[in-house]
Each structure stands twice: as structure tokens, then as C-alpha cells.
Image: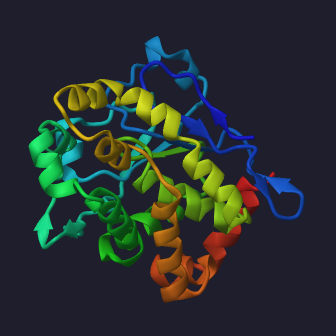
Amino acid sequence: MPQQIDASTIINLRDLGGIALSGNSAVRPGLLLRSGQLDRLDPAADPAVAALGIHTVVDLRSENERTERPDALPEAARLIVADVMADGATAVTGGEQVPARLEDVLGSPAVADQYLGGGKAEKLLGEAYRAFVTAESACRAYGTLLSALAEPDCGPLLFHCTAGKDRTGWAATVILLLLGADEATAEREYLAVNPAVKAAFAPVIDRFTAAGGDPEIADAILGVRPVYLATALEEMGRRYGDVERYVRDGLGVSAQAVERIRARYRA
């Protein structure tokens, strides 16, 4: 089974090792890690992280996110930037672009209700997941991540975004499907981050609801839901048929790289 790692300076840190794959196999432990942002990482104060021996970090965040809260890297780790939303692919609803900063949305119940009330939040997140499949920058970013996984000197790799749930959640799903997990297994891993994410953002949620904000909006934005993942999977199937063709034709990852990934990360 995948492992939630008890780290004090990284939110939502998980090892994908142990997830069941086809052929009575499983993901090899200690090599595929996912998390939220690393701006508070302190390896000296976080022995659980230091023990992982992370060699490669892939940052899926935007330029603004990286500038405001740059990664603190594990010792000797290399950083690869793979900006999923680099080309400005952002979800819109009602013809209006939603403010990108979480604080700008959930900092004001009135703003949140304007942009996200009445079911708009769930629709917005669904469209964001569709963009993970369709946006050119997303295809480049996820292709960069998979290419890094295929490199001989990759070592234990950690991929992350801000909360470690959406951009990171789709990345984990693609990797698991490519390795041979079924969709139900990939969905369980996707949904498993909900408690850790909600705990990490509890102060934001509490302030928002205390000021009169709709708890449904906070839950839709800060949680993960089956419908979000289903939207991305549906779009992948519609455009490419299956994960193999998505990775090859959409992400530009060669068959040889895929075979190296499978050989390395299947136990």
C-alpha cells in the first residue's frame, strides 16, 4: 500500500511504492514520491525527508508560485521546472477568469460567491483538469516529468505542485496507469490525499467559513473529487484512446523511455 510519510516541513508527502499493478506486481517503494510545495522544507529538522535520499525534484507550479515560495531542495537534489500552466491555460467560468491566488478567492466570501458559488467551483475544477490533458504547456510539463523518470541517474524523484492534489494528482494517475494500475486503483490514490490537504489548509478554511463563506466552495476548491479525475480521464480517452497513446502522442515520450520507466518502477 502507498505510504503517507509523516514529514513536519512538507505537506501531503506520499510514497507511491506498494500500489498494486497488473501481473501481480506493485510500484517499487522509495522511488516515486509526491507532495505539496517545498518552501518550508528543512532536512535538518525533518529526518523523515532526509532518509528518502531524494535526487530529483520536479516542480509543476507556475512562475508566480515559484517566485513567491521557492523550493527548498533536499541536499544534493537537482530541480526540474515543469510548469503545467505556463502558457496561461487557466479555467474560466461564465466568461470570467478566476483569480489564481487561493488567498484572493477564499480570502473574501463575496469574491468566492461571485466566481465560485452555485456549483461554479466544481465546474471550474473540472475544466482545469481537462486543461491538464489539452493545454500545450501541460503536455510539455508532464512529458518532462516522465522523461526525467526514464533518465539513468534519476534516483528517487519527488514531483509536486502547491497542495499536491490537482496537477500532482493527475501526474500520479498517469504514472500509475502507465505502470499498469487499473483506473480504480489510480482513483483510490488520487482521493487518498483529501485528509492531508484539508488538514494543511484548515486555517484557510476556518477563516473563510467564520467570515460567512460557503463551506461547499471551500471543499470544492481544496478537496479532490472523483468527477475531477473522471473529466481528465474522459478527455484523455476522447483525444488519445488510452494512456499509451496519450503518453506517446500527447506528451512526446518515446516507447523506449516508457519501457525504462516500467523496468525501473515495477517491483
Q: Residue 243, located in which quarter of the rendered image?
A: bottom right
Q: Is residue 266 left or right of residue 57?
A: right
Whether 86 is drawn above or below 162: the answer is below
Whether 146 is drawn above or below 33: the answer is below
Q: What colour scheme does the image use?
A: rainbow
Question: In the displayed image of the protein, which residue is found farthest to the top?
Answer: 45
Q: Is residue 167 left or right of residue 208?
A: right
Q: Residue 119, located in which quarter of the rendered image?
A: bottom left
Question: In the displayed image of the protein, which residue is found farthest to the right?
Answer: 24
Image quarter where the N terminus lies is: top right
Q: Residue 259, located in which quarter of the rendered image?
A: bottom right
Q: Position of residue 60 (x, y in %)?
A: 36, 53
Q: Residue at x 57, y 64 (%)?
A: 174
- Can residue 258 be seen in this snapshot? yes
Q: Position of residue 22 (x, y in %)?
A: 82, 64
Q: How many marks?
A: 0
Q: Is residue 46 left or right of residue 261?
A: left
Q: Residue at x 25, y 58 (%)?
A: 118
Q: Is residue 86 left or right of residue 31?
A: left
Q: Residue at x 52, y 68 (%)?
A: 230
Q: Residue at x 53, y 63 (%)?
A: 146
Q: For this rendering, which residue is in front, 4 or 60?
A: 4
Q: For this rendering, which residue is in front, 206 or 71?
A: 206
Whether 194 is drawn above or below 51: the answer is below
